[in-house]
């Protein structure tokens, strides 16, 4: 099975921590040259300096606020000119704030759609020519199991994640003939700062302790525990590889069996 990504370049959005950092480590281990994108320069540099360079990779960082489309576009254009095409894109953006769908403001929906759909389209436009020229592309969207089963009290997130999933499915049919696959990877409850925030919010809203909320959430998972970020990254590493060339347009939950449907 060919998992070798030597000679490929990967853009990891949200690469300074959590799932993005774990995926960066996995792809670097497979030989990819990694470009980390997030806001915090110090964190990005720390992750970059810790990545393996066993294939002579020269990993890079882009310190930019992805919600600033003009700045994001400029940073990516400069990086493409400096380092060459990007072949693998991990589209990983933090989710909107929790809350009921009926209580969210119209601006909350508009901001989320801009951040997750419009900005993703802007990045796609920049990366597509290089993928097409190489005859190889992997677009991997980090979404949520809410794509399959909406999660209570995540109204805006449920809405926008579903929008990205349908955007991705449409792209998967349009780009497949160019050697580009588009897949969605759906993390379940994984040990990340995002999970810590959700647990803290659940404790605040319910009056229970953080420990009680965390235990209840873990007990809802058939395997009985939260995932480690590296376990999610293993799935991403496979889908990014040449071995996964015939897997296209899917939603892959990495959730320990928690999602209650097929």
Image (cartoon, grey):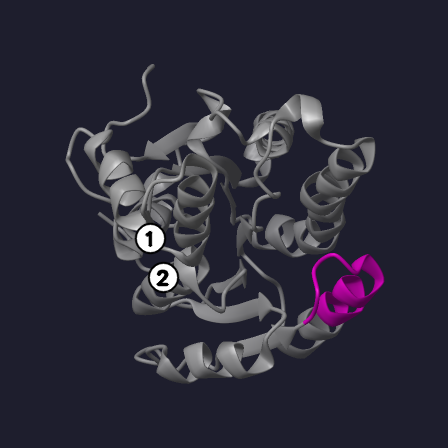
Sequence-first disc among 1 and 2: 2
Q: Residues within 10 Å of mark 2 (few under 14, many from 20)?
A: many
Q: Nearer the viewer, residue 52 or 142?
A: 142
Query: Residue visible at 72% across and 47% down?
Result: 115
Prevailing secondary structure of the magenta residues: helix
Q: Position of residue 80 (x, y in %)?
A: 68, 69
Indicate whether residue 79 is drawn in magenta. Answer: no
**Stretch in magenta:** 64-77
The residue carrying mark 2 is: 22
Q: Position of residue 172 (x, y in %)?
A: 57, 30
Query: Residue visible at 22% across and 41% down?
Result: 215
Query: Residue visible at 57% across and 45% down?
Result: 95
Q: Nearer the viewer, residue 42 or 219?
A: 219
Relative vertical location of residue 214 with respect to residue 102 in this rendering, above or below: below
Q: Position of residue 6 (x, y in %)?
A: 38, 67
Q: Nearer the viewer, residue 210 or 31?
A: 210
Left or right: 254, with 74 as reference point? left
Left or right: 26, with 20 as reference point? left
Instruction: List the single residue furthest toward the left.
Output: 223
**Badge 1 vs badge 2, beta-carbon distance below 8 Å:** yes
Q: Nearer the viewer, residue 111 or 64?
A: 111
Mark 1 and mark 2: Cα distance apart in space: 6 Å
Q: Residues within 10 Å of mark 1 (few under 14, many from 20)?
A: many
The residue carrying mark 1 is: 233
Task: Kindly indicate the quadrant of the structure image that contains residue 56.
Answer: bottom left
* SS at mark 2 in the image: helix
Indicate whether residue 75 is drawn in magenta. Answer: yes
State which quarter of the image contains the C terminus: top left
Relative vertical location of residue 161 with respect to residue 196 in this rendering, above or below: above
């Amino acid at each position: 099975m060919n998992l070798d990504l030597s000679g490929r370049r990967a853009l990891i959005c949200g690469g300074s921590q959590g799932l993005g950092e774990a995926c960066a480590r996995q792809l670097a281990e497979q030989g990819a040259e990694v470009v980390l994108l997030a806001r915090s320069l110090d964190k990005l540099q720390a992750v970059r300096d810790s990545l393996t360079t066993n294939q002579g990779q020269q990993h890079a960082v882009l310190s930019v606020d992805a919600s600033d489309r003009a700045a994001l576009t400029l940073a990516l254009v400069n990086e493409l000119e400096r380092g060459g095409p990007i072949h693998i894109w991990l589209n990983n953006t933090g989710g909107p704030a929790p809350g009921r769908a009926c209580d969210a403001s119209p601006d909350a929906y508009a901001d989320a759609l801009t951040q997750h759909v419009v900005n993703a389209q802007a990045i796609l436009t920049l990366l597509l020519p290089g993928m097409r020229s190489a005859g190889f592309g992997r677009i991997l969207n980090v979404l949520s199991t809410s794509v399959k089963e909406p999660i209570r009290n995540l109204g805006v997130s449920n809405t926008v994640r579903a929008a990205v999933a349908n955007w991705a499915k449409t792209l998967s049919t349009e780009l497949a003939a160019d050697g580009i696959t588009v897949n969605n990877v759906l993390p379940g409850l994984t040990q990340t700062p995002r999970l810590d925030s959700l647990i803290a919010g659940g404790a605040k809203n319910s009056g229970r302790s953080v420990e009680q909320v965390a235990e209840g959430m873990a007990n809802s998972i058939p395997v009985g525990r939260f995932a480690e970020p590296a376990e999610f990254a293993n799935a991403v590493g496979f889908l990014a590889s040449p071995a996964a060339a015939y897997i296209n347009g899917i939603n892959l939950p990495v959730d320990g069996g928690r999602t209650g449907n097929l």
